[in-house]
Image (cartoon, grey):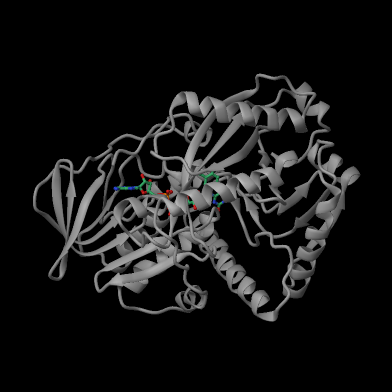
């Protein structure tokens, strides 16, 4: 499978291009550990293994440049909570708490990494808003507020006037602000993970795993220009798990697109009331995620779709970009029409019940992924912990991860694709004004 890099993600283009890219080209190579996928999950797994096994051969491979998948292409919300519209039973509340416990560990894992390596990734503990233009969404936010109060998360409800002051737009009528949660530059974070890989981890890029099979106690992996026999393998390919035949009936890929404006001029920024950096998440699942960055750029993501094949053509991307232009115009009518600087797509993985995958699927095969759109912290955590699990060790973190229910079964295609497409159309309709 060929993975396409549209080279138009602002977060990636903010960084210096990398050099010394190694492509895997050798037949019958052998190693103790092979990690497939070099996003937050794979990089974090490789780091941990590098620390645990300084004398072993550890390979990390990626089909494109490391970190240039969803890990650089996301909106940069390191979340502590996700929206729900209230629970009627204690069991549901308990499930939500288990999910939030994982988010908390995810934040701590990223925080530890950043402290240890003095990483600058525009970290801002400014919390986040769940906002809507529709007064009728107040009920959802009040129910959510109830859940957050029960679990001790600091938050407050805000209305139009206050939101106008804080966000510089009159669009939103109601919002819930959670104090926890961080905004960051996802490209800078993942680049730091690449730059600080332990020396004994060998990174191969532009090296797609084409096929794999288990043979006795090893796994044989085929690449375009060679093959690797590994004792243990960790799959960290997230949105591409299904394409490699991993847990195929438990996850499915979804394509998202986002756009970023240029930096606003002084005059434009003053016209919005000079707001501080902020991040808004939608109340309706298909509504827009929108963010004002610390350098005065506006990011918007307002599409989510089943899009096969993985390569989104320039023409298709331009159509999504147009929707994002409209989304920005709705919220900031005073800004010029042509301020979008770039648009890009990215692939994430979803499960039916929003649980993540963290599993030993055979005695030497491990998989971590499916973060349902919240993988910055959880991916970093899961990468580290799957490496520990693959070393036959246990931790408190693994117990917390495994306390959550596993992903539930999904029907095969084409039933699955039809069901997801129908659901997305319905959600899009419900979120119409919020896109
Ligand atoms: C537009 C967008 C907005 C998002 N917003 C947020 C957000 O605000 N907050 C948040 O927490 N999450 C967000 N996400 C989700 C988040 O980016 C992902 O959950 C996270 O990046 C997953 O990390 P990962 O390392 O598991 O996967 P990825 O970063 O996708 O890495 C997987 C890697 O595997 C490689 N690969 C795939 N197949 C092969 C193969 N056959 N051989 C070799 N390599 C292969 C890919 O090239 C890729 O680099 C967003 C995602 C997108 C696209």
| Residue 389 placement (x, y as % from top left) | 35, 73
Q: Nearer the viewer, residue 401 or 187?
A: 401
Residue plotted at (51% across, 62% down)? 352
**Left or right: where does residue 167 sit relative to residue 411?**
right
**Left or right: where does residue 284 sit relative to residue 318?**
right
Residue 147 seen from this side = yes
| Residue 379 placement (x, y as % from top left) | 47, 58
Residue plotted at (51% across, 78% down)? 403
Residue plotted at (70% across, 48% down)? 282
Q: Nearer the viewer, residue 41 or 210?
A: 210
Q: Nearer the viewer, residue 68 or 82?
A: 82
Q: Nearer the viewer, residue 14 or 412?
A: 412
| Residue 11 placement (x, y as % from top left) | 52, 36
Q: Give the residue at the far right of this rendering.
A: 161
Up-down relation of residue 271 to residue 171 (above or below): above
- The N terminus lies in quadrant: top left
Q: On the image, which quarter does residue 34 sit in?
A: bottom left
Up-down relation of residue 232 to residue 275 (above or below): below
Residue plotted at (65% across, 22% down)? 339
- The C terminus lies in quadrant: top right
**Left or right: where does residue 136 sit relative to residue 284?**
right
| Residue 217 placement (x, y as % from top left) | 15, 70
Residue 277 seen from this side = no
Up-down relation of residue 263 to residue 153 (above or below): above
């Amino acid at each position: 499978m060929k993975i396409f890099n549209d080279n138009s993600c602002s977060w990636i283009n903010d960084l210096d291009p990398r050099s010394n890219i190694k492509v895997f080209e050798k037949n019958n190579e052998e190693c103790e550990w092979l990690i497939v996928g070099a996003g937050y999950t794979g990089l974090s797994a490789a780091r941990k293994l590098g620390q645990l096994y300084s004398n072993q051969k550890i390979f990390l491979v990626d089909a494109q440049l490391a970190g240039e998948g969803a890990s650089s292409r996301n909106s940069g919300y390191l979340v502590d909570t996700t929206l729900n519209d209230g629970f009627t039973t204690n069991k549901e509340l308990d499930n939500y708490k288990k999910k939030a416990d994982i988010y908390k560990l995810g934040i701590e894992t990223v925080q530890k990494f950043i402290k240890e390596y003095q990483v600058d990734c525009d970290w801002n503990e400014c919390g986040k808003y769940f906002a809507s233009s529709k007064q009728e969404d107040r009920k959802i936010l009040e129910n959510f507020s109830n859940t957050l109060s029960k679990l001790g998360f600091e938050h407050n409800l805000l209305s139009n006037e206050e939101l106008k002051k804080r966000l510089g737009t009159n669009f939103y009528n109601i919002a819930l602000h959670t104090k926890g949660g961080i905004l960051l530059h996802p490209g800078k974070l993942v680049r730091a993970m690449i730059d600080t890989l332990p020396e004994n981890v060998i990174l191969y890029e532009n090296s797609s795993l084409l096929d794999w099979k288990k043979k006795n106690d090893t796994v044989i992996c085929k690449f375009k220009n060679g093959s690797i026999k590994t004792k243990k393998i960790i799959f960290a390919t997230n949105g591409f798990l299904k394409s490699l035949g991993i847990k195929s009936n438990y996850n499915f890929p979804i394509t998202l697109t986002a756009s970023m404006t240029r930096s606003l001029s002084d005059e434009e920024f003053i016209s919005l009331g000079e707001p501080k950096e902020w991040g808004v998440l939608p109340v309706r699942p298909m509504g827009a995620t929108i963010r004002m960055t610390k350098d005065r750029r506006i990011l918007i993501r307002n599409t989510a779709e089943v899009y096969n094949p993985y390569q989104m053509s320039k023409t298709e991307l331009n159509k999504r970009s147009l929707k994002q232009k409209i989304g920005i115009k709705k919220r900031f009518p005073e800004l010029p029409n042509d301020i979008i600087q770039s648009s890009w797509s990215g692939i994430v993985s979803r499960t039916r019940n929003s649980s993540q995958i963290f599993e030993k699927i055979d005695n030497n095969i491990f998989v971590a992924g499916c973060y349902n759109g919240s993988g910055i912290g959880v991916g970093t955590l899961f990468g580290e912990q799957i490496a520990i699990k693959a070393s036959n060790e246990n931790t408190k973190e693994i117990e917390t991860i495994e306390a959550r229910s596993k992903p539930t079964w999904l029907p095969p295609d084409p039933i699955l694709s039809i069901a997801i497409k129908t659901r997305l159309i319905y959600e899009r309709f419900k979120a119409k004004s919020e896109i």
